[in-house]
Amino acid sequence: MIIVGLTGSIGMGKSTAATRFRHHGIPVCDADAEVHKLYAGKAAPLIEEAFPGTTVDGVVDRQKLGAELLKDPGGFKTLEAIVHPLVREAERKFLQDAQTAGHQIAVLEIPLLFETGADALVDKTVVVSAGPDEQSRRVLERPGMTVEKLESIIARQQPDDQKRAKADFLVDSSGPVTDSAAQVDDILMQLKDAANQCDQAQAYHRHWSGA
């Protein structure tokens, strides 16, 4: 099984690309969605201990946590030390299930793929990218988003040009959604060709068994 790391900075269109992979029956694990689950589950008491007052009824209040992190950006390392191992655990289970189901390809959608070193755990990387003006326009349209928040998020992410340079495949999402979809379709054809030429089980076990 070929494991694909799908990434891109905030507002670049990762979710749209992930939706296209799912459209073709490719299983996708969304790291952000896993974090949301953890905030209402395993991670909540650990985060409350590290950041007192940031949970309500046993669930992390993202606005309160975000406010704490804006005041002290150093807290991101503490948060990541709590959350990242739990996300990896969920991803490992996802890949085990995909392998058992006989999928040739599985996608891990990870916003901080390169920043966390998770690119070492995948076989191929797909970076979704658009220009900075388009990125800002998209993100600032989101409810509750401010320029200050956007700058804080971008500061923690690897520059887009560096991600593009590391990508095995690139999706330029600056145009219509149909253009991005066509690019994903082309990438998927190449991935399927590669999957047909490799030992599926060997590719999976090399990265994740006992990781």
Image: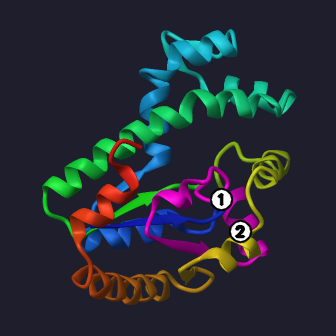
Image quadrant holding the N terminus, namely: bottom left
Image quadrant in which you'd find residue 173: bottom right
- Few, some or many residues within 10 Å of mark 2 (<14, 14–19, 20+): some
Residue 119, by quadrant, is bottom right
On the image, the x and y values in percent for residue 202 come to: 27, 64
Helix, strand or loop at mark 1:
loop
**In front: 65, or 163?**
163
* Quarter containing the C terminus: top left
Residue at image mark 2: 135
Q: Quadrant of residue 26?
A: bottom left
Q: CA distance from mark 1 to mark 2?
A: 7 Å
- Residue 94 in the image, given as x and y percentages of width and height: 29, 47
Residue under label 1, please give it.
10
Tag 2: residue type?
Answer: Gln
Residue at the spot 55% in from the left edge and 32% down from the top edge: 83
Q: Amino acid at mark 1?
A: Ile
Q: Residue at x 74, y 61 (%)?
A: 158
Camera-side residue: 55 or 28?
28
> What residue is drawn where x is 42% and y is 58%?
108
- Against 164, residue 52 (above or below) is above
Q: Which residues are magenta?
A: 112-141
